[in-house]
Amino acid sequence: MTSIVRNQWYVAAYGREVGREVFGRTICGESILFWRREDGSATAMSDRCVHRRFPLSEKPSHLVGDTVVCGYHGFTYDADGTCVAVPGQTRVPRTARLKSYPVVEQDSFVWVFIGDDDRSDTVPIPRAPWLDQEGYTTVSGMEPLAARASLLVDNLMDLSHETYLHGGYIGTPEVANTPITTEVDEDAQVVYVSRHMDDADCPPFYAKSTGIEGRIVRWQDIEFHPPCLYLLHSRVAPVGTLPNEDGTDPGGFHVEVVYAITPETEHSTHDFWAVARDFALEDEGVSDFLRESNRTVVLQDVVALDALERVLAGEPDGYQELSINIDTGGLAARRIMAAQAAAGAEQVPESPAALAR
């Protein structure tokens, strides 16, 4: 059975990546072409010409107004994927039509619906409003992962690995040594994992960005929306500094860490990451530091997860892994995603050629 969950919205790109040049990206095994119409709206269609399957994202394919001209034989498509011109003849074959995809821009992301288009209006898109919200400054990026998406989910749901894999950046002994609490909202299909540290070392990631000296209160509150959006609500403050009873928190520094986990194929993943903060909003030095530090952390994860994928590829059937208390959130996420994948398994396309209809 496929591990890819269908009939879901996935992040395909940052809005800044999609413009007036055709842009291709594989999402959930489907090669998709993205570009902006002249009115600025984003559009998505299959990245394969119906004639000889030439990728429309490859030069010399190009835009003419609100149409895409294939760079191989000149077949021309409108923004809905309908072929509107064929070289050498006036009649356009009735079947000369590409699959188009529902697209929504939200929270700096371009989301695409993978599955039955008729269901796109019934599936909510999870929110990450801090990424383009007044009062926050955001840095972001994307790294390719040569590993299945579920490995990245496991990684992010159990942050105890920060102590060992990310020491010197975000990891301290307290992260691994502090117990977690886990809750699952079965109706909304959201998994919550919390780790609150009352007296912890301040790692360089926070010390250098906030200016805090000494030990800190450090809260990590995970909110995962399977299969694709991970939110880490992070709060740091000097030891003993807690929010007020009315919920205001002038003594705390708040960082919203967002990961959009988008399968490229069964065994590769687009790892979109963003860090939004509510302090030092105009400080470019802080932005540069957080951007480079978080990218370093992401690349450390990439190395580890790529290695894990190679291990899994050569693993004998029936291998039994060990899970412990800190895995409760990750196991809940696995359960929800397995049910989602089973429900949409019949939607998997047979081949890239099947994307043209």
Image (cartoon, rainbow, N blue to C red):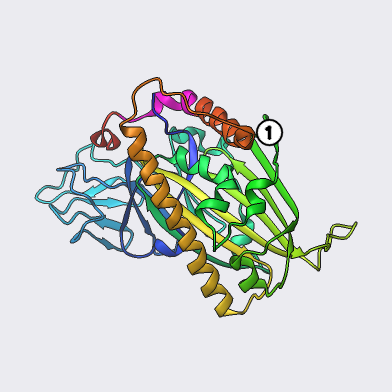
Residue at position x 58%, y 75% in the image: 286
Residue at position x 68%, y 72% in the image: 279
Specify the farthest residue to the right: 245
Relative to 322, 81 lies left or right: left
Residue range corresponding to the magenta coloring? 341-349
Relative to 200, 127 lies left or right: left
Relative to 214, 335 lies left or right: left
For disc 1, the neighbor class at 10 Å (few under 14, some 14 to 19, many from 20) is some
User: Between 299 and 94, which is closer to the camera in this rendering?
Assistant: 299
User: Between 21 and 301, which is closer to the camera in this rendering?
Assistant: 301
> Predominant secondary structure in magenta?
helix
Q: Is residue 237 above or below residue 226?
A: below
Q: Please say whether residue 103 is one of the residues in the magenta stretch.
A: no
* Quadrant of the image containing the C terminus: top left
Q: List x then y, in percent, for residue 135.
A: 69, 69
User: Between 13 and 78, which is closer to the camera in this rendering?
Assistant: 13
Q: List x then y, in percent, for residue 33.
A: 32, 51
Q: List x then y, in percent, for residue 101.
A: 40, 43
For residue 26, say whether it is visible: yes
For residue 266, say whether it is visible: no
Q: List x then y, in percent, for residue 270.
A: 41, 49
Q: Quadrant of residue 182?
A: top right
Q: Amino acid at mark 1?
A: Val
Label 1 sits on a secondary structure element that is strand
Q: Quadrant of residue 323?
A: top right
Residue for badge 1: 184
Specify the farthest residue to the top: 318
